[in-house]
Image (cartoon, rainbow, N blue to C red):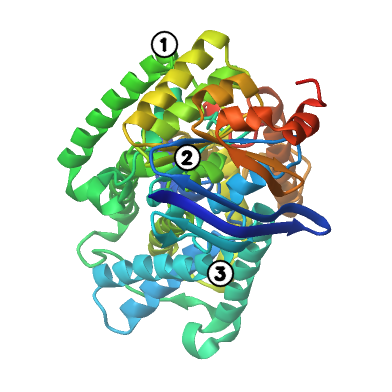
Amino acid sequence: MDILSVKDLKKHFGGVKAVDGCSIAIETGTVMGLIGPNGAGKTTMFNLISGFERGVGEIMFKGIRTDKLSPFKIARCGMVRTFQIPRALTKMTVSENLMLAPKTQAGERIWDVWLRPRRVREQERQIREKSRDILEFFEISHLGDEYAGALSGGQKKLLEMARAMMIDPSMMLLDEPFAGVNPTLARKISRYIRELRDDGMTFLVIEHDIPAITKISDRIVFMNEGKVMAEGEPAEIKRRRDVLEVYMGGEG
Amino acid sequence: MIEYVDTLLPYITTILLISSIYAIFSLGLNLEWGFTGIINFGHVAFLAIGAYTTVMFNMSGFPLFLSVIAGIVLSGFFGLLLGIPTLRLREDYLAIVTIGFSEVLRFILLNEQWLTRGPFGIHGFERPLQDVIPYQHYNTFLLILYLVILAIIYLSLERLVRSPWGRVLKSIREDEAVPSALGKNVFWYRLQSLMIGSAIAGLAGAMLAFYISYIDPNTFKPIETFHAWIIIILGGTASNKGTIVGALVFCTFLSVTQFTNRFLPFTAHQMGAFRMIVIGLLLMLLMMYKPEGIFGKKEELALSD
């Protein structure tokens, strides 16, 4: 079953065809890698799928047409994304960043703050506990009470992924999760992605680190100039001469 | 000595009364700007709506308490009306629209004489418990009442901004793409913040009317909005405690400097301008040396980046 299917998606900025008729389908519980040179349209694809930009074409997520929905509604369907340039909320603490994420928090409704204080407190406790576990996994638990503005670029990246994990999404869009992350942790994240996939979560991952992405992906889509140029299993893509030429300047 | 006390106490009472009204008015704006990042340059409109609604409801026969509630609710409702078409705008455009809104409202109050008596203003309306409290103690009573109201508003706001609800507001203040990506309805939260901030300003409007027992459209000029902004910046953006202290400092300063023209070679009119120059200078110094204000947190400074 495909959790996400995109049909003939287009997005033009003036004369620039950022995404020009892309169709992809991702099966539930798999990892799809999205690769391609800079300016290929990968991030625009992310923005279209997550609702941050409007394009032309059809996007179905879990059987729902999402191409006309606003980002928060798509997120509520169970899709969460990270950003290429990490968007940590720098004026909030690391814990607060994580605790913001979970959906259906009673305390986010103003009347529940007054009418059901006990339930709000209890939920806060659970969320705080969960955030501690996730911070521990990402090895940034010692930073919980720091303002996120004090974090390094790599740490902000981790924070963003940790925050996304707090939602328990059915699908995650990760925009360059390994960029600026040390190799040990990158391996750990890879392992975690595979574990979550085995539990049924679906991933769409933009990444320039080809060895890393081929290792974790079940399928890979190669984009160039707004078009899907190749799609297949990692081993297949690696053998494609045209991919190698465009992407690696033919060195491969 | 006794004479001093006799003149000083009413004077201090007056300052505290004005401060408490300004504090509540500014706390509403602090929720919008300090915690949500909404640039509202028309906050005074809701002070006016609260004051006029309370007074007009009361004069047409409603009990005073209900009239105040009507003032609060209607202010919040107008916050909703203003917010629906405007809260999707970028900050600077929102600033322009809101200041326009407050001026349009003031001109309506000025010109629709059948409703508001226009420039003649309204007086002779009921004040809380005015038949029970002896006249010479009335301001003391009002002060106690206002301090209680201020305490309630302060504690309620503290509870709200420390709740998960407040956490969403703070995330919107910094980068609304993040809460959107996490499934929060940013627009709805901004609307709630504007409604509550406006309702609080409406309450301050009723309090102002009771204190000065006379209202006219020129009580609600845009400068009042900017007084609230000065108070928030002075006390520390996103600090409710700071806003209250800011109101006290600001009102004391305005009040005390009324007498300084005895020592300075200025006319009363020149003194008014001179005071604003001094305030401007003080704010510039504050921005240079303590940009987060008296109680603000540097790490949460809304103006930085």
Q: Chain of mark 2?
A: B
Name the residue located 68 percent from the left edge and 33 percent from the top edge.
Answer: B282
Q: Nearer the viewer, residue A75 or A183?
A: A183
Q: Are marks 2 and 3 on the same chain?
A: yes
SS at badge 1: helix
x, y percentage for residue A18? Answer: 74, 51
Give the residue at x 81% y 25%: A250
Crowding at dot 2, Cα within 10 Å, few <14 / some 14-19 / many 20+, comes out as: many
Q: Which residue lies under the disc numbered 3? A: B85
Q: In the image, which is nearer the foreground, mark 3 or mark 1?
A: 1
The amino acid type found where label 1 is placed reads His
Instruction: Tell me which label, 2 or 3, sits earlier in the chain.
Output: 3
Q: Amino acid at mark 3?
A: Pro
Where's the C terminus of chain B, which quadrant? top right
Q: Residue furthest top?
A: A184
Distance (Cα) linking label 3 and label 1: 44 Å
Element at badge 2?
helix
B239 or B60, which lies in front? B239
Q: Is residue A124 left or right of residue A40?
A: left
Task: State which quadrant residue B161 falls in.
Answer: top left
Q: Which residue is mark 1?
A: A142
Residue where numbered disc 2 is placed: B170
Residue at screen point 42% across, 41% down: A171
| Drawn side of residue B144 relative to residue A237, left or right | left
The N terminus of chain B: image quadrant: top left
> Between marks 2 and 3, how big is the CA–CA gap?
22 Å
Q: Is residue A17 visible?
A: yes
